[in-house]
Image: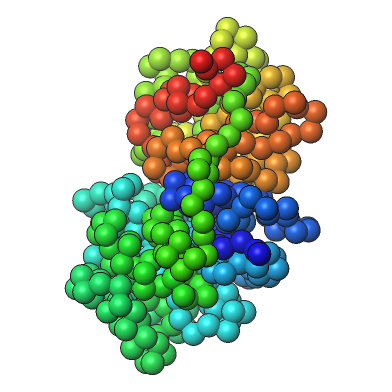
């Protein structure tokens, strides 16, 4: 017996987001960082999510990495494969969503897949092929200012058509309203017309359930984590998945509490403001980081002092678009990002070695940098903090207890996320 679902995520927080929903829907899930070199022991695992850093890299590299992940997951016996990207569909006009989906379909010898980015519980919905964030179209939601992948077009059929030479179709809300079987027939009719990619309208959880019923037998599905929430019930109906008690159970947490934030999303900026009104924080400046090591040393000294006083402590590079653009103009977009990611990674390595055992990281690129710096290769997925964000645990060499780690997508979480995350995490002292 192999795993039921094998997923390929294009960034670290997106992987955790999907894994969180799979656990909440009854699947025991492990997230691996990059493609493992050997098979895993999977006696108590139903799903594996491979986290790549392929959202913003050249399309050719994203395709190569994704195909390697697919080959490994097929070797683990995956019944279905899932290509996970952000619920805001952020990409460039050249990719990487279209090129990766095309390559996966060709490797699987499949003729069609669906595109289901919607995550209604977090305000991501699709209607007539247009993506909304809350009550705003994607291009008016703040995503038009994304520092790496600005999204200035909410029409996903049009966006994807610029990324693939193959036809792109739509499964509209009126089709979904007729149920799973009718939606499956609509997809089959589009396949007969050689429509390879189908953008799917999704307004609520009921739509996700209809889509899960319609696509459960597809070799490949793609989208955000909302679809991952609906698929496990379909697996159980087919006898692929057994009922499991406490699929997200983790060991009690221990150690000091630290938050590292590199995201500049509106949601994270609000979370930073909320935290700073109650706890200490240190603002990282890319220009100061470029000037030498003194700024990083000051951040480290600040964190050490506050952690010794009991924490939690925040170190953040999160800033409003004007400040981000000024730093990027002075340093270049790539260098500004690298400086922040390197600093957050170094802080994580040093402070975890010195006793931090509970760590929250905000932002997909920041999470990737921190996880890579710590040498983490595998995460066990625990219970949810907020929609899309669970606690996880990772074993580290030289530590008796695993590191408790929450990797938060920039756009996710309530305003009090940074403070509440530690309050909901069971610790060794919890009665």
Q: Image check: 30 left or right of 196?
A: right
- Residue 89 position, x and y percent, is 41, 60
Q: Which colour style is shown?
A: rainbow
Residue at 33 percent across and 47 percent down: it is 122
Q: Image check: 303 left or right of 132?
A: right
Q: Is residue 262 above or below residue 184?
A: above
User: Is residue 275 or residue 113 the one in the foreground?
Assistant: 113
Q: Is residue 170 above or below residue 140?
A: below
- Residue 229 position, x and y percent, is 41, 54
Q: Is residue 309 above or below residue 202?
A: above
Residue at 63 percent across and 19 percent down: it is 255
User: Total number of numbered labels?
Assistant: 0
Q: Is residue 24 above or below residue 308?
A: below
Residue 249, image quadrant: top right
Extreme residue toward the top, this view: 309
- Residue 232 position, x and y percent, is 45, 58
- Residue 76 position, x and y percent, is 68, 64
Residue at 68 percent across and 31 percent down: it is 402
């Amino acid at each position: 017996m192999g795993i039921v679902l094998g997923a390929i995520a294009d960034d670290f927080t997106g992987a955790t987001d999907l894994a969180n929903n799979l656990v909440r829907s009854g699947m025991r899930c492990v997230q691996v960082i990059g493609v493992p070199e050997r098979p895993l022991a999977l006696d108590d695992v139903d799903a594996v999510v491979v986290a790549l850093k392929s959202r913003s890299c050249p399309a050719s590299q994203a395709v190569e990495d994704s195909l390697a992940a697919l080959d490994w997951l097929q070797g683990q016996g995956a019944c279905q494969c899932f290509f996970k990207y952000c619920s805001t569909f952020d990409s460039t006009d050249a990719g990487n969503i279209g090129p990766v989906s095309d390559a996966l379909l060709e490797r699987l010898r499949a003729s069609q897949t669906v595109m289901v980015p919607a995550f209604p519980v977090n305000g991501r919905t699709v209607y007539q092929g247009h993506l909304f964030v809350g009550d705003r179209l994607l291009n008016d939601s703040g995503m038009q200012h994304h520092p790496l992948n600005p999204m200035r077009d909410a029409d996903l059929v049009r966006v994807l058509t610029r990324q693939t030479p193959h036809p792109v179709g739509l499964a509209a809300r009126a089709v979904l309203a007729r149920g799973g079987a009718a939606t499956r027939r609509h997809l089959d009719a589009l396949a007969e017309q050689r429509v390879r990619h189908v953008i799917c309208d999704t307004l609520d959880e009921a739509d996700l359930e209809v889509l899960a019923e319609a696509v459960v037998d597809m070799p490949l599905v793609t989208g955000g984590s909302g679809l991952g929430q609906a698929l496990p019930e379909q697996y159980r109906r087919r006898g692929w998945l057994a009922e499991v008690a406490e699929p997200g159970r983790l060991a009690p947490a221990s150690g000091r509490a630290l938050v590292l934030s590199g995201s500049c999303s509106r949601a994270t900026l609000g979370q930073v403001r909320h935290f700073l009104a109650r706890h200490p924080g240190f603002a990282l400046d890319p220009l100061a980081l470029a000037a030498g090591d003194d700024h990083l040393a000051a951040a480290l000294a600040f964190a050490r002092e506050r952690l010794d006083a009991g924490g939690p402590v925040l170190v953040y590079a999160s800033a409003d678009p004007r400040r981000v653009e000024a730093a990027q103009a002075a340093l270049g977009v790539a260098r500004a990002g690298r400086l922040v990611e390197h600093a957050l990674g170094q802080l994580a390595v040093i402070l975890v070695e010195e006793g931090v055992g509970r760590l929250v990281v905000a932002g997909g690129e920041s999470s990737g940098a921190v996880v890579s710096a710590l040498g983490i290769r595998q995460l066990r997925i625990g219970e949810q903090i907020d929609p899309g964000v669970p606690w996880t645990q990772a074993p580290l060499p030289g530590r008796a207890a695993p590191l408790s780690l929450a990797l938060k997508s920039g756009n996710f979480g309530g305003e009090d996320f940074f403070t509440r995350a530690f309050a909901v995490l069971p610790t060794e002292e919890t009665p």
